[in-house]
């Protein structure tokens, strides 16, 4: 089985559970991604073979993309995998096309639309054409929410007979267990995301300023990667200005986010669009209310007023209002939300449910072979 994403980090953070399940089923797992000493070694320790593959995840160089395509094709012809599983844009497009030429069944994952589809531009049109080419002969294309699926079908990037829905990447309920209420720091709100405009970071800061003006003494923390290769990345200068102003606290990313979630009164994600937000699922699984923008990939997780609060997207004032509602919750209501969130994740978003869907597709491929 060949797996690919635009970063080894992506596979380590989101796919290790799936890799373990596939290895238990007897599959040999080969991962290709840009070389990354720490995460490559982590994959190898988990029983994977790692093949370095250069992918320019942000760039628009035709030369680099052609080189990536031929690298995928060379790898597939060499190892002849049972199937190719791809995540992120370029592995889906160029890996999907290489799989088509090498007669390898492709199971591709659209886990979020990214910046190209959040706002229409010439890049949107280009990516639409490339997706049509890369996904044309895929065995299955997984989507994590219905709006994303419907958009791809409507734009003829994929056929209805190819698509299937997947409830995210799955949450390990034995790892993300309810955090003790005593660990909660009342009034401490946490956002865990890459520091991007499209994640709603500026709205989070605006909400912090509004709440401060309303007289609330809260801690709003932001944890995530800065200087990300993305067109909406927020630079360190702007981030540092918010910290200096006392609006937010910044924390560098860590391998284990559980201690940060445990401290939270609630976890916040005002993103403009998601596939299925993993951090919201992790927070809910740990018994923390969640606050998010009412957008695809978030609204499926947040039952407004039951497991947390939804607010209008791209609206700092609406986000401030939602945070204020959470601050003013009576203790029993807060506890009820925490319990309801955990129950929803266990019912709808567990790893076991996700793995069963992958197994069903892969078993069909191996049976046909």
Image (cartoon, rainbow, N blue to C red):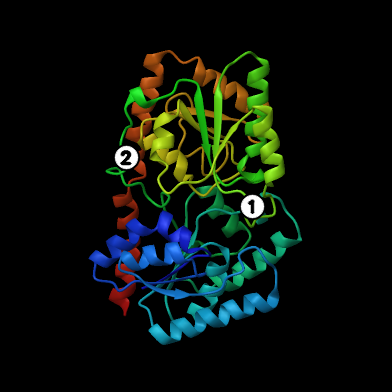
Residue 342 image offset from top left, x and y in percent? 34, 34
Assess disc 2: are there few (<14), some (14-19) or many (≥20) residues with their C-alpha within 10 Å of its C-alpha.
Answer: few
Q: Tag on residue 227?
A: 1
Q: Residue 218 carries which label?
A: none
366 lies above or below 78: above
Numbered disc in front, either 1 or 2: 1
Q: Is residue 137 visible?
A: yes
The residue that appears at 67% across and 44% down in the rendered structure is: 197
Q: Quadrant of residue 307?
A: top left
Image spot of residue 8 (x, y percent): 47, 64
If you read the primary sequence from the N terminus, does the residue marked by circle 1 or circle 2 appear first? Answer: 1
Q: Name the residue under label 2.
A: 347
Q: Is residue 350 above or below residue 85?
A: above
- Toward the front, the furthest residue is 244
Q: In which quarter of the image is the C terminus?
A: bottom left
Instruction: Identify the residue at image location x=42%, y=29%.
Output: 263
């Amino acid at each position: 089985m060949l797996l690919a994403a635009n970063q080894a980090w992506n596979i380590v953070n989101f796919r290790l559970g799936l890799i373990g399940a596939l290895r238990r089923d007897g599959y040999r797992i080969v991962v290709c991604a840009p070389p990354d000493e720490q995460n490559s070694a982590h994959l190898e320790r988990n029983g994977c073979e790692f093949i370095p593959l250069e992918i320019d995840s942000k760039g628009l160089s035709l030369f680099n993309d052609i080189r990536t395509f031929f690298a995928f094709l060379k790898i597939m012809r060499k190892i002849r995998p049972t199937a190719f599983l791809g995540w992120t844009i370029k592995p889906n497009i160029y890996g999907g096309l290489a799989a088509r030429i090498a007669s390898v069944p492709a199971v591709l994952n659209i886990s979020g639309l990214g910046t190209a589809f959040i706002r229409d531009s010439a890049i949107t049109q280009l990516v639409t054409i490339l997706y049509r080419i890369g996904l044309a002969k895929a065995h299955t294309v997984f989507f994590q929410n219905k709006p994303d699926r419907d958009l791809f079908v409507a734009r003829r990037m994929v056929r209805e007979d190819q698509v299937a829905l997947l409830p995210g990447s799955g949450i390990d309920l034995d790892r993300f267990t309810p955090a003790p209420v005593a660990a909660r720091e009342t009034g401490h709100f946490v956002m865990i995301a890459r520091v991007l405009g499209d994640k709603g970071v500026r709205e989070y800061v605006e909400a912090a300023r509004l709440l401060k003006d309303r007289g609330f003494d809260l801690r709003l923390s932001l944890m995530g990667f800065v200087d990300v290769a993305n067109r909406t990345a927020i630079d360190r200068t702007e981030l540092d200005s918010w910290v200096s102003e006392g609006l937010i606290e910044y924390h560098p990313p860590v391998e284990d986010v559980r201690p940060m979630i445990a401290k939270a009164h609630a976890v916040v994600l005002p993103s403009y669009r998601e596939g299925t937000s993993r951090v919201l699922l992790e927070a809910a699984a740990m018994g923390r209310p969640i606050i998010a923008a009412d957008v695809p990939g978030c609204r499926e997780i947040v039952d407004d007023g039951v497991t947390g609060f939804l607010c209008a997207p791209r609206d700092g004032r609406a986000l401030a209002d939602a945070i204020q509602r959470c601050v003013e919750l009576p203790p029993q209501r807060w506890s009820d939300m925490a319990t309801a969130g955990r129950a929803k994740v266990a019912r709808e978003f567990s790893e076991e449910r996700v793995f069963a869907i992958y197994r069903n597709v892969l078993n069909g491929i191996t049976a046909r072979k």
